[in-house]
Amino acid sequence: MASHPPPEPSSDSNKQGWGDHEEIHVSSGGVQAYTDDDADCESRRPLLLGTPAAAECYSVSAAVLPFLFPALGGLLYGYDIGATSGATISLKSSTFSGTTWYNLSSVQTGLVVSGSLYGALIGSVLAYTIADFLGRRKELVISSISYLIGAFLTAAAPNFAIMVVGRFLYGIGIGLAMHAAPMYIAETAPSQIRGMLISLKEFFIVLGMLLGYIAGNLYVEVVSGWRYMYATSTPLCLVMGVGMCWLPSSPRWLLLCAIQGNGNLPETKEIATRCLCRLRGQASPDLVSEQVNLILEELSYIDQEKQASFSEIFQGKCLKAMIIGCGLVFFQQVTGQPSVLYYAATILQSAGFSGASDATRVSILLGLLKLIMTGVAVLVVDRLGRRPLLIGGVSGITVSLFLLSSYYTLLKDASYLAVIALLLYVGCYQLSFGPIGWLMISEVFPLRLRGRGLSVAVLVNFASNALVTFAFSPLEDLIGTGLLFCGFGVIAVASLVFIFWIVPETKGLTLEEIEASL
């Protein structure tokens, strides 16, 4: 497999979104970050900031497995979303439930549907305390174990209480996986394809949803079909766990631990070099060693020796990263993503689609569209950059929300308009907020605070999802569907302003260059 040298950094790609008083200069020595406040002490700033072209050589085949096994955590998350939509139908059916406790109340049904969401919130909180202690790889191993036990308990549950426990344990696996997977991929992937690989994780989430919808469609009319739907995920849990045990640790995490006194530095440096050689494939050991030295040099310069404290997350460049990351995942949810999909079956039925009467088939249709559009985002994210996809996609989301609002208030006979708006929303979401939100939060946090900062961002994501999901019905009753979608549209306009002025372009930069730019 041929090695791939990195592209030259672009001085233009980083001028927007960082603030009015910052500038990125590119020279033959690399990328250097300056601000007005420290322009007078240029001599004291590091020159890190440029990774020699050969240092980012890599083999494509070597980059596959370090992406694949963490991405299975995303696929299992998506599968749960898809399978649960069919499982609730099966579980509540007197004919196909296969239980004596099928007559579930609305609260019990809500616990089945949202139990994994509550578990994910717990997993996000746990990630804050264990991420930097255990490391990205071990966190993903624990996530796979939680997935496996949760799926087994849910599928084999003899009563409702055990099923809810299983749903919570599976959700803890989701919270840990969605925290550790983007970090591991970001810290081990070559900078030239980092955006593509982290965006491809979103592709795996959508693929998991599609597989879950298909499983629901296959088993929905089988006695105890819901058990088969949940049990189907257990082999993937095993593959993920075994694969993560085989993969090397993140070299950046290993070096950070050594710098902070948790290990012998020369020995850790040698281990990190071996890990990076495995991750880069055919790259020369000398070039890999040079890249390890560059990471160590930056860690030493930016005073990473101290353990991160909670207050530091809200100071300096981490505060900037927190605003960018949490802002993106917050807007990702409060622009109505859970609610629009909630109305999908109703909209398609109103348009007269014969298959729309079967909820599982409607879900498969939308799952295919989401998969295709996510694939498009994966292919272009490292060419076009993050900002163009976000601005273009969120603009489409804004238009679609106002179209849905018009349909429910003024144009109730124009069902075709609602279908167009629905498809536009789904497609644009998968081009922008879907993959780019997870990509950006894995890139912008500084290494020493990445584990804790990312856990806060993941917590904001799941909490925002819960907020929108649970507030939707009361708000709909209070102000009406049309005004509610209009409100989502106004929030989408606010998110466009946020993206334009706050979110930076990180295309083609190493994680150390992004950190220095902040």
Image (cartoon, helix red, strand yellow):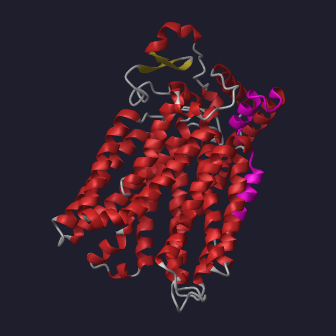
The image shows residue 253 at horizontal and vertical percentages of 70, 37
Instruction: Decide which of 353, 347 is in the foreground and name it.
Output: 347
User: In the displayed structure, would residue 264 be above or below residue 231?
Assistant: above
In this rendering, position of residue 276 left or right of residue 331: right
Instruction: Decide which of 144, 262 is in the foreground and name it.
Output: 262
Question: Is-magenta flag for residue 483?
Answer: no
Question: Is-magenta flag for residue 260?
Answer: yes
- Indicate the quadrant where residue 260 lies: top right
* Quadrant including the N terminus: top right
The image shows residue 199 at horizontal and vertical percentages of 51, 49
**How would you classify the magenta stretch by its main secondary structure?**
helix
In this rendering, position of residue 172 left or right of residue 28: right
Magenta-drawn segment: 237-265
User: In the displayed structure, would residue 184 be above or below residue 313?
Assistant: below
Asked whether residue 181 is in view, the answer is no
User: In the displayed structure, would residue 14 be above or below residue 401?
Assistant: above
The image shows residue 336 at horizontal and vertical percentages of 36, 57
The residue at the point 65 percent across, 29 percent down is: 55
* Furthest residue in direction left, as rendered: 410
- Indicate the quadrant where residue 5 lies: top right
Asked whether residue 347 is in view, the answer is yes
User: In the displayed structure, would residue 177 be above or below residue 266?
Assistant: below
In this rendering, position of residue 259 left or right of residue 503: right
